[in-house]
Amino acid sequence: MDIQQYMLSVGKQAREASRAMARADSNAKNTALHAIAAAIRRESAALVAANQEDLAAARAAGLEPAMLDRLTLNEKGVAAMAEGVEQVASLADPVGEISDLKFRPSGIQVGKMRVPLGVIGIIYEARPNVTADAAALCLKSGNAAILRGGSEAIRSNRAIAALVQEGLASAGLPANAVQVINTTDRAAVGYLITLREFVDVIVPRGGKGLISRLLAESRVPMIQHLDGNCHVYIDDEADADKALRIVENAKTQRYGTCNTTESLLVARSVAARLLPPIAAMLSEKNVEIRGCAETLALIKNATAASEEDYATEFLAPIISVKIVAGLDEAIEHINHYGSHHTEAIISENYTKAMRFLREVDSASVMVNASTRFADGFEYGLGAEIGISTDKIHARGPVGLEGLTSQKWIVLGNGQVRG
């Protein structure tokens, strides 16, 4: 295969399909989404079987447990994937929405119209559910998508993509509106991220290595986050039961996700009372605790944390712990070591909670809730294309609105400028 010619062909087909998608009405898009969801449910066993082949190859290749966890697609996951597609269908269509329409002294009306971005390239590792999520969101927002999944999920992604294209065709929409790159050759990524004439934005979903490479090499604008070093801060006015429950969920529900808590901060005045039961819970779940000197004095099985530990997204049963003087030090620590992804405060003090919300510089900031809520499904977006820690265009979970932009529109009745 000539990779360059193949990628040019994919880009041209995507650009052509994007024009048809931009003018597609909501009914056609929703019909396609419901057809896709039905096909996913119908082919559940086949999807799981394809995924089992991917998993077998991944284990043979020695992939890490966190990657295997992301790669796994079982019957429950297939059902959730179909539900996510249906949720996107149920959401309001943002395309064509007109806002801020105002009369000017000249008599013209000036406002903004929401429009698709065009062609979106999504580059991701492991998780095959991203194929369905990304396809659904791009479809509903009137975009065409070029999907480049990891080589470890190639069988799963091909199987899902075939069902997506079946659903598009059944609704009279171009099948090329969603294309999965049908090669595991890494050169395909290099071409995709330089196709400025065909691709409008790149959305990377993967590890730090992938995103660092794309930041260095991409000629196409990106919506991305580098890593997810998320924090929970237990304030000196925290409810002990809430703190224990939230830390348990935020750290131990899943280890391989970007919204999993990696760092725990505890106010000094309550550390001796609240930290030992939390540490006992973490130890029971075989979570390694790496802490500051004060933490080591309270938790005998903890090991010393390095400077690097406080800045690390472990994606593993490891957590860094630091005892801090109070809110000011907690905010300073998070803004210094964090990755601007998701942070939470556990506190019954309204004023402190509001300060935390205002002053912590992250895409999602929470009060008395697990950081694991930071995703599109839980935020009511139906699904997400990714989580952005950028500050321009889109921030946090990126759903339908994040896959559109606005253009100025002017409504007149023969006015000319004097």
Image (cartoon, rainbow, N blue to C red):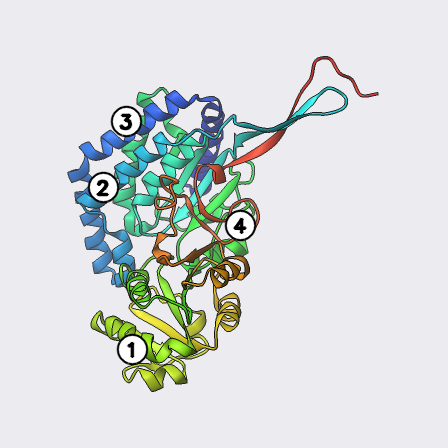
| Disc sitting over residue 358 in the figure | none
> Mark 2 falls on what kind of element?
helix
Q: What element carries label 3?
A: helix
Could you tell which of marks 4 and 2 lies nearer the N-terminus? 2
C-beta proximity under 8 Å, tags 4 and 3: no
Q: Give the mark nearer the N terminus: 4 vs 3.
A: 3
Q: Mark 2 or 1, which is nearer the eye?
A: 1
Residue 235 seen in the figure: yes
How far apart are labels 3 and 2 at the CA level? 15 Å
* Amino acid tagged 2: Val
State yes or no: discs 4 and 2 in contact (Cβ < 8 Å). no
Among the two numbered marks 3 and 2 on one chain, the one whose residue lies closer to the N terminus: 3
Which badge, 4 or 1, comes first in the chain's sequence? 4
Say which residue label 2 marks: 78
Q: Given the image, on which type of amino acid does mark 4 rest?
A: Ser
Instruction: Return the x and y of residue 220 as percentages of the image width and height.
Output: 54, 45
The kind of residue tagged 1 is Pro
Place of residue 177 in the rendered image (x, y in percent of width and height, measured from the top left): 41, 30
Above or below, comparing residue 92 to residue 372 in the picture: above
